[in-house]
Amino acid sequence: MKNRVAQFEQLILPCPGERLEAMAAESRALTLRHFGSTMRLFAPLYLSNECVNVCRYCGFSRDNPILRVTLTPGQVETEARHLMQQGFRNILLVAGEHPRFVSEHYLVECVQRLRTLGLPSVHLEVGPMETEDYRPIVAAGAEGLVVYQETYDRKIYAEMHTVGPKKDYDWRLACPDRAYAAGFRRIGIGALFGLSEWRAEATALAVHLDALLSRCWKAFFTVSLPRLRPAAGEFQPLVQMSDRDLAQIVFALRIAFPQVGIVLSTRESPSLRDGLASLGITMMSAGSHTEPGGYTGAGKDDLHLTTRGKRMEASAELIRSEGEHATEQFAIADDRPVETVVSRIREMGYEPVWKDWDTGIQ
């Protein structure tokens, strides 16, 4: 078998346009071979923007003066019903890291409620936990876990994460292994591009993926390639990464790791998402909101302000009069309605896949 990492490193070297076009064609052919003319769809559902970490680039960072809220399990169910009405059967539960608000027991109840609604695929993107803490969540019906290392550069990681449990680089790095041991059947990893030189970051991501594929061979892996977007705190990317660079990583991943899923979120523009949809991407979000209660306004009456790390109660009257919602994690770039994204996927000759798994298969 080819050395996948060495192949990937060669594929992301600077290259002329003709070579990139050849890579795009190969990536497209491999995607069709392994995934067919399909696009798996999902929606993020934000549970809470409370967080104990200080991360310089994140809108949820503890030191940002933002409107915060944690949805009750009932409010989570309200948001999920709205997404199901739009067609979604694959939902990603997202939350800041705050054990007092987003505990193992809270997550178990949220997952149970969503599974009772008939959702076959529930995934989590929350603060890393111990294997034993994950097991009840898996037993409740959670199928997958997503955890981004953010940056694989240890020096930059330490500079970006200054307060909170997220400071521990190695604890986060080992999270996919703990998730696998707990029984998650889908695991997603990724790096946040804009914090360090993109080729070095992408290579480290490929090394991590290669190791996980060898150790956790029963799980299906996906890779996300998010780029920094505007957020509270107004952090600016330390390095730039062009659309061409992002496309080259997508092609290189598909060629070196042909059976791995590649995710493209609404962080990216409609034109780029449409352009890459047939060239290696296998999973997309659509119609996304990155704040708790963003789909239905759930939790609006429970909003509170944080200023310099100290909580200040915001008056419900002020919130209602100004029509405010919880602060989003980051601004999305593709704000097209779900039906528009689905229509565009079909126009390109692809079939939107809302559901590809059910416990009945077992």
Image (cartoon, rainbow, N blue to C red):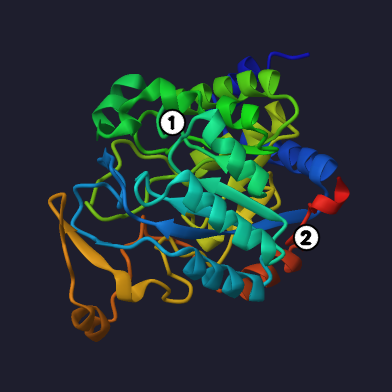
Q: Is 241 left, or right, of 113 in this rendering?
A: left
Q: What is the x, y in percent for residue 325?
A: 32, 72
Quote the CA–CA distance across marks 2 and 1. Answer: 30 Å
Position of residue 132 measured from the top left corner of the image (x, y, whole percent): 55, 31
- x, y (%) of residue 215? 67, 18
Residue depicted at 49% across the width and 63% down the height? 73
Placement of 42 over or under 81, stated as above or below:
above
Residue 186 lies, with reference to residue 232, above or below; the image says above
Q: Can I make out residue 18 in this image?
A: no
- The vertical placement of 353 against 95, above or below, is below
Relative depth, front residue between 338 and 360: 360
On the image, numbered disc 1 is attached to which residue? Answer: 198
* Kind of residue sitting beneath label 2: Tyr
Position of residue 292 in the picture relative to residue 271 (left or right): left
**Residue 41 circle label:** none
Q: Position of residue 154 (x, y in %)?
A: 34, 20
Give the camera-side residue of 35 and 247.
Answer: 35
Where is residue 116, by image quadrant?
A: bottom right
Evaluate whether residue 304 shows in this view: yes
Q: Residue furthest right?
A: 361
Q: Residue at x 85, y 53 (%)?
A: 360
Q: Which residue is mark 2?
A: 350
Q: Which residue type does callout 1 highlight?
A: Trp
